[in-house]
Image (cartoon, helix red, strand yellow):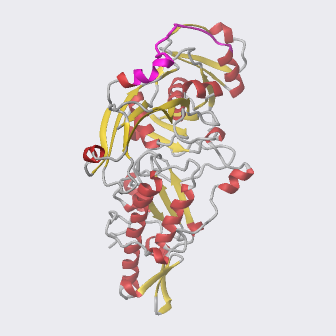
Amino acid sequence: MLDAPTTRRDFLKGTGALIVSFSLAGPLAEASAQTVTAAKPVALDEVDSFLTLASTGRVTVYTGKVDLGTGTRTSLRQIVAEELDVPLDWIALVEGDTATTPDQGPTWGSLTIQVGGVQIRQASATARKALLEQAAQRLGVAPDALEIRYGVVRVKTDSTRSVGYGELIGDREFHLKVDKTAPLKNPGEYTIVGTSVPRVDIPAKVTGEWRYMQDVRVPGMLHARVVRPPAVGAELRSVDESSVSGIKGLRKVVRQANFLAVVADSEWAAVKAASRLKATWSSWEGLPEMSKLYEHVRSTAINKDEVTIDKGDPKAALAGAAKRLEATYEFAIHTHGSIGPSCAIAEWKNDQLTVWTASQATHLLRRDLAMTFGVPADKVRCLYFDGAGCYGRNGHEDAAADAALLAREMGRPVRVQWMRHDEQFGAVLYVRQRPRRLPSARDDAVQAVVDPDTRPDAEHLRERSVHGRARCGGRRRSHRIQAAAHE
């Protein structure tokens, strides 16, 4: 059953603070909601962490996952609309806001639906069960005598006896733990999930109205560019600030150890200053020779050794195989740079940091920034916006760190927009798989049995990963370069 409901007005009387879900609309993304007070639940076991229902019957869904272009901001709406029996267009979605969404893990590995969606679905089922029970009390019937249509609970045999979600819970909290045993809707009754519905983001993307991270503006912000070294591990020796003294609108040349940047009133002034600033860097040749790259990776200490599949007796299957194949796969190395170079905005106010970012792991970024700047995590808020051409690893987290450092230095919001050469030089390296040779058996060789008369009954997969850190702009990157060997 629902606990005694708490209104937002009552909550404010007790705490004096409230986080409001808002849309950054219009020509400027207002730098509001700076207070990062834990007014809204974000624990993974709380229904209120995932859902709020307004008095109008409208539903807001909160997810720590973000949409990288795969359409999940539509499909997550479908899941909730289906489970609660409300129209799809009644669903709003807040994604990746670390102050109001639960930490459901980074957005990768195709886990948004199979993990994040399952969590949201179960929270919705819990809410539905509680709403049915409360409606049954109000209408004086058993819960199984009720049905739900368009957010209205009504008696099956008398549709004139009904009560809407808004009347039952509107603008109040559930105060319920997610019930893993709450019954889910029968898939045979689905009317929304499994159907083809228009994606909610496509119209604005087609017309050019969609706001990407690169389009976000905050009142009073300055523009910055980071000056990168000519080599990954080069150290900054000297800077000639007189080389940019004549650029109108240049506010400051910022140097902290090996980090070098320029801050200006306009983006073009920052671009000019970054290209003209004379700096001297040390030489550095610490990368392995390309011909010895894979030997270098194999000789690196193992960071993680994990058996992910262990089925049957693979050794016996290999020993008795009719035919046996062995192969080693090496990955060609490419940058994983976005079509639109990485971008972020940061602002410090009252010792609290707000970051506008296209990170696909905003909750991880929040913790990284808190650690980097020596502040509690609850003093950092990350707000998600789509990256232009973002999919997979990129420099958005690093751009956020750039912006946070410069905003602290300037005492004003700072926008850092990477350039194309920044993205290509600094992007995390990814590896693409292609076969190179058929070697003799070795630890990292793939071994398989070829036998058309039997089905596979043994399988073993072991993943060993090593890591290193790339250096960019004289500081450590927040993400590790990772290579994996499979046996």
Residue at the spot 38% in from the left edge and 55% down from the top edge: 41
Residue at the spot 53% in from the left edge and 65% down from the top edge: 78
* The C terminus lies in quadrant: top left
Q: How many marks?
A: 0
Q: Is residue 322 above or below residue 338?
A: below
Q: Nearer the viewer, residue 226 or 293?
A: 293
Of all residues, the one furthest to the front in this rendering is 322
Which segment did they paint magenta?
A: 276-297
Q: Is residue 156 left or right of residue 27?
A: left
Q: Is residue 321 left or right of residue 169?
A: left
Q: Is residue 193 above or below residue 250?
A: below
Residue at the spot 55% in from the left edge and 25% down from the top edge: 426
Residue 206 placement (x, y as % from top left) = 72, 52
- Residue 278 among those drawn in magenta: yes
Residue 225 placement (x, y as % from top left) = 61, 24
* The N terminus lies in quadrant: bottom left
Q: Nearer the viewer, residue 298 or 321?
A: 321
